[in-house]
Amino acid sequence: MKNKIRPLVAALALTPLLATAALPQYAPVTDIRLANPEPQNWLSYRGNYASWGYSSLKQINTQNVAKLKLAWAYSTGMTEGHQSPPIVNNGYMYITTPNNQVIAFEAATGKELWRYKKTIPEELQQLHPTNRGVALYGNKLYLATTDATLVALDAVTGKELWKTAVADWKKGYYMTLAPLAAKGKIMVGSSGGEYGIRGFVAAFDAETGKEAWRTHTVAGPGEPGGDTWPADTYKRGGGSVWITGSYDPDTNLAYWGVGNAGPWMPDTRAGDNLYANSTIALDVDTGKLKGYHQYHWNDGWDWDEVSAPLLIDVERNGKKIKSLVHAGRNGYLWLLERTNSKINFVDAWPYVTQNVFKSIDPKTGRPTYDPARTPGTGKTVNFCPSLWGGKDWPPEAYNPGTGLLYIPANNNLCSELTGEPAKYNAGELYIGVSIDNILTNVRMDDKARKHVGEVQAWDIKTGKKVWTHTYPEMNWGPLLTTGGNLVFGGGTNDRKFRAFDATNGKLLWEFPTNSGVTGVPSTFEIDGEQFVAVQSGWGVDAQRMQGAFDAVLPHKTVVPQGGVLMVFKLEQ
Amino acid sequence: MKTDSSCCNCSKPKDPGRRSALKICTGALLGLAAASAHRTHAGEISDARPEIGDFLVRTDAEGGTQPLTISDLAVGDKPILAFPLEPASGAIKSGSRLNKVIVFRVQPEEIDEDMRRNSVEGIVAYSAVCTHQGCDITNYVPKDNALICFCHFSQFKPTHGGEVIGGPAPRRLPVLPLKAENGRLVVAGKFSSKPGATAG
Ligand code: FES
């Protein structure tokens, strides 16, 4: 990293420098640190490459979490979904907000260091006005934007160093994920499945922004899997990448979740439609596909399998497995085995009400479907879970102390969809279900009216559910689990952020925030003091689901908008 | 793959009607190809907002560049998405998606007095770009008398000047006033407010 500061820049930087006098010199983020993150820091989207959402910090624990108090808060001035984790490196904290902004803080005090606002094209449409966080690497920070640009900033000054156009936003490509940094590369994927994009994961040189490789998530002619798309449907086949991949440094493979195929009606693209609704393993050096598992073929339910699997070593039936664990939007909990050359199916079982799969092949994991519950053009079907699935993008968490996997689930909820023909126009919606149908898709029986949202804890060794906490309506809360034997999460329309006992699910603490919490929580330590941080700011899919609930329920729920970053610590 | 984002700003808000020299990026050029490629400053027209006297043409190829007429629209039909067309040059103003309008017909007696002045025999035209986060508005649901935006379900009342009746949109949908000349639909005034997403 060259640190040539010209006089003008130095003068401009004077005030922030004084303000940050308490901060140590910025510690470059290396591959070694990312592979073994220090407990006091939260260096990446899920805290580690295995996507656990776990910290071994235990100063805040089941005994004292009731004394958790707000240490500082910061109003972002933005509405919409605030979903990014506060990412912390030795006292420097970074959050992103909707509309492609990054704010840097002194993590202990909340002092603002700098703020970056990406210029947004006037003509841009933002179906998902959100951002899920930055990646740190070297002395730089990386942001993927809704106008499909990858931006590199100086992590200390916030100065823009380079930006690279990743795809054409006018054709409906956009990015909301936190990039994945490894081995000198910054990896991102694109959303836009609803606009008829062809999804991909791409890697860029961390230093220069130059593209290193690009691998499509929708196989084209001549590529393995290319024959699972009729005619030229692959060109508009969707396969969005919404969420940061997991990474196994031992095999140099990154695991990405791939969204649904587009348009929604499966009869418009007869075939398995690889690699939609799959997890794919990509070699980080070359982008080469090294394995995949398709959770369900020829999707018709909008069940994007967006979140990346968690890398967990589990013992099952006396055998040690290097596994991939994924709570599917399709309502099944998947246990797969990862090797350096392929992905093997191990087991899968429903974790919410699911009435579409009639069976799962015990060898391959391939499901068979109930045709009466499979959507089609000109056909109306009812199916569970709803189009938002058993779990949407909000990440699960894994605690190696309890050995439990925690899932932010939506149970009991079903959808009704009527397929109609879809016509492709670049940059325009390409779905095949009418908008008013989507608005009123939710179907609720007595069970759903009693409760939908859940936090579930599963012992993946035994395949047994250990505890469930239920909410009357939805749960859109990403989870954090800690060495203090705690699980943190929000996600409900009553604006609360909560802490549970990780062993038994007992609710130990809750805090009514300004808005609904759909942010990814993180934890860190500074000068021996542990903090828990989360953004509260309702919007995007949670708000959309609320709209759909309001359309069918006798009451309406107003969740106020406006983003606030909240940082908690124990009362002295 | 590096890009200068200034290209993305080529369609910055302009005073409607002002014809300043503009940088033209690919997006703007694409829309032009179908219209009048021979014009030196065609890009300016393609990007310029609708003006009094402009005709309306369908955004898709099906209708060709035939200006819309009153008889193209019947009550109960799906809305038509259209771009303005400058009659003098024949240029379609499709360079900016902020020029996209949604046109459809309702029963004239449902329309309030203010809006009636901007409509023709029950035909109304609005900006097809949601004032929330800028998504396309393509759907009219007659039973709710609502234009609905897919992105976050904002709803607007087209018989009442596009007022917000649901969802997160912070302001009404811009009206494009219409009149009729020889059965053709003709733009009778500028957008009632700036089309596009509302900053903040
Ligand atoms: S962009 Fe239309 S409701 Fe959000």
Image (cartoon, coloured by chain):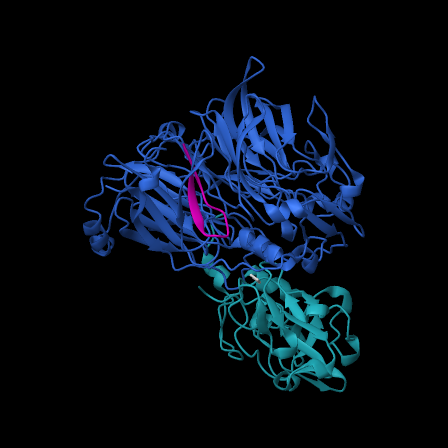
Camera-nearest residue between A478 and A34: A478
Which hue belongs to chain B? cyan
Camera-nearest residue between B137 and A361: A361
Residue at the spot x=74%, y=35% of the render? A227
Is A571 situated above or below B98? Answer: above
What stretch of residues is rendered in magenta? A486-499
Q: Where residue A198 sits in the image (x, y, percent)?
A: 63, 45
Please tell me in which quadrant of the rendered image residue A228 appears. top right
Residue ranking furthest to the top: A318
Q: Which chain is the one coloured blue?
A: A
Residue at the spot x=69%, y=44% of the render? A301
Camera-nearest residue between A85 and A477: A477
Relative horizontal placement of residue A18, taking residue A72 as reference (left or right): left
Work out which quarter of the rendered image holds the C terminus of chain B and state it.
Answer: bottom left
Is A296 situated above or below A155? Answer: above
Q: Is residue A411 visible?
A: yes
